[in-house]
Amino acid sequence: MIKLLEPAQSERWDHYVMAASDGSFFHLSAWQQVIKQAFAHDTYYYYTEQDGEITGILPLTHVNSLLFGNSLVSNAFCVYGGIVASNDEAFAALQAQAQQLARELGVDSLEMRNRQQHHPDWPHKELYVTFRKELDPYVEKNLNAIPRKQRAMVRAGIKAGLSSVIDDNVERLYRAYSESVRNLGTPVFPKKYFQILLDVFGENCEVLTIEHEGQLVASVMSFYFKGEVLPYYGGGTDAARDLKGNDFMYWEVMRRAVEKGCKIFDYGRSKVGTGSYRFKKHWGFEPEPLYYEVDLVKAKQIPEINPLNPKYRLFIAAWKRLPLPVSQLVGPWLAKDLG
């Protein structure tokens, strides 16, 4: 039996996600609340049930944009998603339900963001990889495991007198992050989105900020889940480059995560060949392919809504030149549909 998630069943849903080997932070029920509050998109969180027990879950978000197309995604604004199921019957039922909903909504495409290939007969985006690495329980061993040149960057940040603090709000994170994404030519999410994440996920969401002589250098929001740390939204000010602020920041995330008992550092998604891809490689992380599998409904080919698409080149170049307050004002209107 397939059901739509109701608030009263959220605890059962999350218990299933926590117990499932392929359940990720981005499968948690709270994302439904986050996406509704921050972006007002329609969500459809389906689960299968047999003999009173949940046997599979699938979070879906409908993003319908005049500029960026009409899609059904598992899960939008997240790097992982897709079906988590205990058996083939539950998997097939959830896939069929998603395909039926996609056609009822008249979307261009249905996208499942999987770490492993689950829909081999669907085309997938050969664009993204993820970077994950086991952490040693001893802090110094993790530092020594960083390749020599990158380790020197971390030590330079330490020598420069950088320090890290935990913020209980998103003000400084938003300043650093919005500046960084503007410099990349990308619209920024609204500030309220980051505050909602912090409020909704509580102790499993943390903002770490890097200071130099009391001044903001860089900041990052990380998620904690099943012994993993996922630094997810981060950025630096102009000062970060000379002070090696970003290098020091990610080391501080790693160091603190080890002290919390985390076993996995998940550096997250990058596009192959980009600056963030090379940065993560320099840390000694090896890329793992992501299978963003797409069921083409109305579209003839996989939608290419990403900065590497040549048709966005002029837009990106112009956006990089925007004054920061303007990008913070206009960016959220565009970013809400870039799920």
Image (spheres, rainbow, N blue to C red):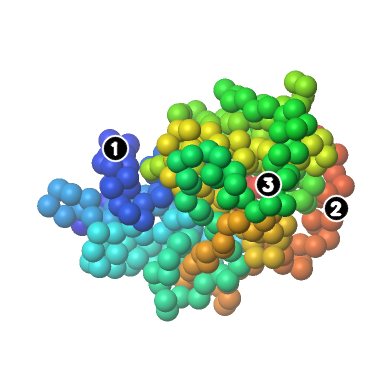
> Quadrant of the rendered structure where residue 92 is?
bottom left
Would residue 54 appear left or right of 120 to someone viewing this image? Answer: left
Amino acid identity at mark 3: Arg
Residue 56 percent location from the top left of the image: 28, 56
Residue 148 percent location from the top left of the image: 68, 52
Amino acid identity at mark 1: Glu
Q: Give the secondary structure at mark 1.
A: helix
Residue 241 percent location from the top left of the image: 80, 42
Q: Nearer the viewer, mark 3 or mark 1?
A: 3
Query: Which residue does the image show at 36% across and 59% down from the upper left?
Result: 83
User: For mark 2, does the 10 Å Cα neighbourhood hold few (<14), some (14 to 19), or many (20 or more) residues?
Assistant: few
Q: Give the secondary structure at mark 3.
A: helix
Of marks 3 and 1, which one's residue comes earlier in the chain? 1
Q: CA distance from mark 3 to mark 2?
A: 35 Å
Tell me the residue that label 3 is attached to: 151
Q: CA distance from mark 3 to mark 1?
A: 42 Å
Of marks 1 and 2, which one's residue comes earlier in the chain? 1
Q: Nearer the viewer, mark 3 or mark 2?
A: 3
Tell me the residue that label 2 is attached to: 318
Would residue 90 appear left or right of 193 to someone viewing this image? Answer: left
User: For mark 1, does the 10 Å Cα neighbourhood hold few (<14), some (14 to 19), or many (20 or more) residues?
Assistant: few
Of marks 3 and 2, which one's residue comes earlier in the chain? 3
Would residue 87 appear left or right of 203 to someone viewing this image? Answer: left
| In the depicted structure, whether residue 252 falls above or below residue 26 | above
Query: Which residue does the image show at 45% across and 33% down from the upper left?
Result: 260
Q: Give 86 or 133, whichever is nearer the viewer.
A: 133
Can residue 112 be seen in this snapshot?
A: yes
